[in-house]
Amino acid sequence: MRSVVDRMKTPHHFRQAHRSRSRPGLSGAAPLRWRGADDHPLAEDPAKEAVEHALRPAGHEAHGASESALTMTFFEDLRVAREGLASLGFWALQVYRLGHLRYRFQSRLVRYPLGVLHLVLAKLAEMLCGVTIGVSARIGRRLVIEHSGAIVVHGLAVIGDDCIIRQGVTIGNRRMDRPLEAPHLGHRVNVGAGAKILGAVRVGDDADIGANAVVITDVPAGALAVGVPARIILRGQAHDPS
């Protein structure tokens, strides 16, 4: 059986092997849900939701991993990093994971030192790796930052398992008067270089975001988003050159 790294070298086949059999259209797409997330939809008051997320105690994290699982996540991230320990994106991701660890502790004696350490390392990651990831973002397992540089991930963004993002990608808010609205990406989402995913949009599982696309609307599972602003192309439909 091929290793995870070997499968990642052929992303089309890797995604095809994990695609869902049902690919609902825009009107029939089920809302994207994070594994283990609460059943309620996106909060009407994003500021309240942000505070609740930041104060959420141990055991209520989106991925719910224990300390031993954190070590497993480190090696999973390393396995899928094409350059291994030489990958700048891998190290930027680990800085995020270290900072996010503090949300599992209620004691300020633990949270504050971790917060200070993360602040220093995060600034180094910005300068050396060109990657900015908000510490309160919820990122799943085996994220691949294929090429580092000019990557920004909002602090309230959600990214599922086995996703790929490339250089120049922004996953952030759309409007200055709604700074806490952030995208939710499903599992196995492939984001092309230079793409922008903005606002409280939801990208379904196995979706592809084309290079330099600007996504400001929901993308159904298994669909392709291309252009500025992005047009949604459902799989199996003929491409409209206009």
Image (cartoon, helix red, strand yellow):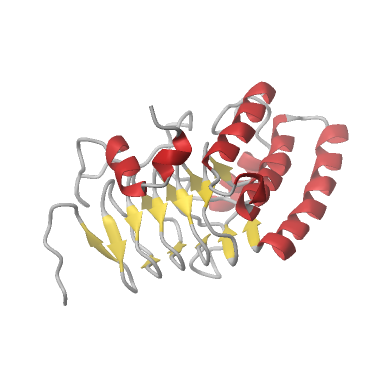
Looking at the image, is 180 positioned above or below residue 53? below
Residue nearest the viewer, comparing 192 with 170 = 192
Looking at the image, is 85 positioned above or below residue 234? above
- Is there any visible trace of residue 41 in the rendered image? no
Taking the spot 67% from the left edge, 43% from the top edge, the residue there is 94
Q: Percent x, y for residue 169?
A: 50, 63
Q: Percent x, y for residue 65?
A: 60, 26
215 left or right, relative to 237:
right
Q: Residue furthest bottom?
A: 242
Taking the spot 45% from the left edge, 31% from the top edge, the residue there is 35
Residue nearest the viewer, comparing 91 with 9 = 9
Looking at the image, is 60 positioned above or below residue 54? above
Residue nearest the viewer, comparing 214 with 61 = 214
Q: Percent x, y for residue 226?
A: 30, 66
Q: Percent x, y for residue 9?
A: 41, 47
Snapshot quadrant of residue 21: top left
What is the count of numbered marks? 0
Looking at the image, is 233 positioned above or below residue 114? below
Snapshot quadrant of residue 217: bottom left
